[in-house]
Amino acid sequence: MLWDVQPGDVVQLRKAHPCGSSQWTVTRIGADIGLKCAGCGHRVMLTRGDFNKRVKKILSRAGNAAPLSGPIP
């Protein structure tokens, strides 16, 4: 399942971070995807394959308040 994300998008991962938050903001797109925890601000880098496995849904798009979910067909 491939997810089309851009920097600034807010995504929900399958497992919660130890701080209790499961929401992450996409900060970087490239060979790896950079994420920042919405709860504590912790930053991580995931490979695209690992990101695609861990993401549950896209909560909001950058510059758009409407919630979205679902992979690219």
Image: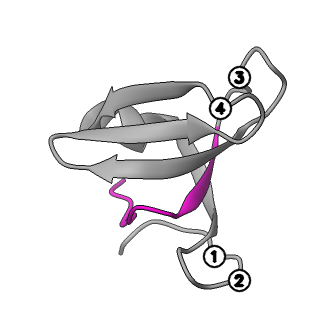
Label 2: which residue?
A: 65
Identify the mark at residue 68; answer none if there is no mark: 1
Tell me which label, 1 or 3, sits earlier in the chain.
3
Q: Is residue 44 left or right of residue 45?
A: right
Please tell me whether residue 14 is drawn above or below residue 7 in the rendered image. above
Residue lying furthest left: 31
Q: Secondary structure at mark 1?
A: loop
Tell me which label, 4 or 3, sits earlier in the chain.
3
Q: How far across and down, in percent of the image, does residue 42 sit?
A: 59, 25
Q: For marks 3 and 2, give the CA distance.
A: 24 Å
Q: Name the amino acid, label 1.
A: Leu
Q: For marks 1 and 3, give the CA distance.
A: 21 Å
Q: Is residue 16 left or right of residue 4?
A: right
Q: For marks 1 and 4, give the CA distance.
A: 23 Å
Residue at image x 36%, y 66%? 4
Label 3: which residue?
A: 17
